[in-house]
Amino acid sequence: CGWSHKRERHSTSRLGSMRVYEKALGVSSREMETISAVASWTTCSIGMMVFNKLAIGAFPAACTLTAIQMLVSSVLLLAFARSSIHIGSWQDVWRWCMVVPLFVGMLLTSLLALEHAPMSLVIAFRGTSPILALAVERLYPEPLRVSARMVAAMVAMCLGVALYCRDMQWAESRDGVLWVMLNSLFAVGDRLVQRYLLAKEQRPVDVSTTGVALLNNALSLVPMGFAVLLTGEFRQIVPLCRNLSGLGVFWVAASCVVGCGISFTGVWVQRLIAATSFLVMVNVSKFAIIALEVYAIKTKHPLTAVQVAGVALTIVAGVWYAQARRDIEDKNKDGETLPLAIGGKA
């Protein structure tokens, strides 16, 4: 009973503090949550790409590394977030299994892309993901209207990729390009299906944010285990571990920890923003990664000025596209409420 009263006082105090912050900053609790989710995911996203790039270089076994990340994420969630994990029923688990193949494909192809290509190439080609997402959304019963600004932004994305490719070493980057394109397909499918299962208007699954992160990682361990066996990577695990340096262990551990964070924050963000907006946000967070590749991480072929301009154009075009899309979505919301207002006056 005393514990319950203490918990109530803590919750009341926390709610009061949140209201003070909201009043001071002039934002609603929904906006504060969105800002927090986006900032958290961006931090994890930058760390995930950088640490994955360094981890796959130190431990070149993509399937095994992905399985390790999933296992560590599952253990950390059970150890530190068990109280917040909620899964309504086995039916919700069964429905969420739709996501597993896409989630596995997205993580695995991401590592393979980073193994065969520089981070800037991955960022440049992933920058066109909103085009693919929009194409899939055209199949929806009520697809979003495409404006001239959205089309112009998509053209700018493609131009940015073309600029990057002008000075690219095609002979060495061909495999990387193929993995990035495949990764984009999995990423779009993953985001759209998760958005469908989590959206309030679409009979969402009764699973908490941490529960979704746990399901993503725990359920994916099964197909990843088969992948390790089928590719023969299990024979390489012992030799790779013996040759792993202390710094290599750190990169692998860091990628696992950040991977757990991105699993949680990714689902958190998707509850608050649309799938295409999420993909655009991915592109916006990549400026810091480009700076790291240019100034901190040594690559075999340093980026040229034209390539940097191409990646920058792709990212800026992503921001432009996000704004244009948001304007259309806002107009659609206004259009939905206008007939009700007129009817009320009548």
Image (cartoon, grey):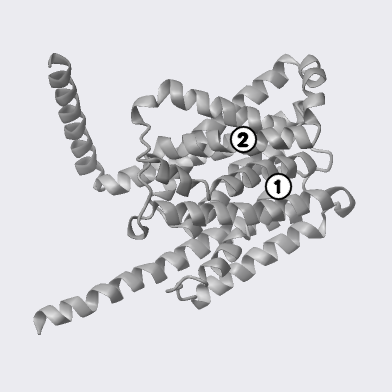
Residue at the limit of the structure toward the front, as seen here: 90
Q: Is residue 83 above or below residue 230?
A: above
Is residue 181 shown above or below 263?
Answer: below
Q: Is residue 200 above or below residue 301?
A: below
| In the foreground, 180 or 280 | 180
Query: Dot 1 surroundings within 10 Å: few (below 14), some, or many (20 or more)?
Result: many
Q: Nearer the viewer, mark 2 or mark 1?
A: 2
- Per the image, the residue denoted by label 1 is 120
| Res. 22 in view | yes
Q: Position of residue 62 (x, y in %)?
A: 73, 35
- Residue 55 position in % (x across, y down): 70, 29
Residue visible at 60% across and 68% down? Answer: 154
Instruction: Point out the image quarter for the N terminus.
Output: top left
Residue depicted at 68% across the width and 41% down the height: 108
Q: Quadrant of residue 209?
A: top left
Q: Is residue 43 visible?
A: no
The picture places residue 281, in percent across and down from the top left corner, at 51, 51
**Real-space CA distance between mark 2 and mark 1, rounded to the nearest whole angstrom:** 32 Å
**Badge 2 element:** helix
Q: Residue furthest right?
A: 171
Residue 169: image location, x then y, percent: 86, 51
Mark 2 residue type? Val
Q: Write down the residue under mark 2.
A: 222
Amino acid type for the residue under numbered disc 1: Ser
> Looking at the rendering, in which quadrant would you find the C terminus?
bottom left
Judge left or right: residue 129 versus residue 3: right
Provide the secondary structure element on which disc 1 rests: helix
Q: Residue at x 77, y 53 (%)?
A: 177
The residue lying toward the viewer, choosing from 177 and 313, is 177
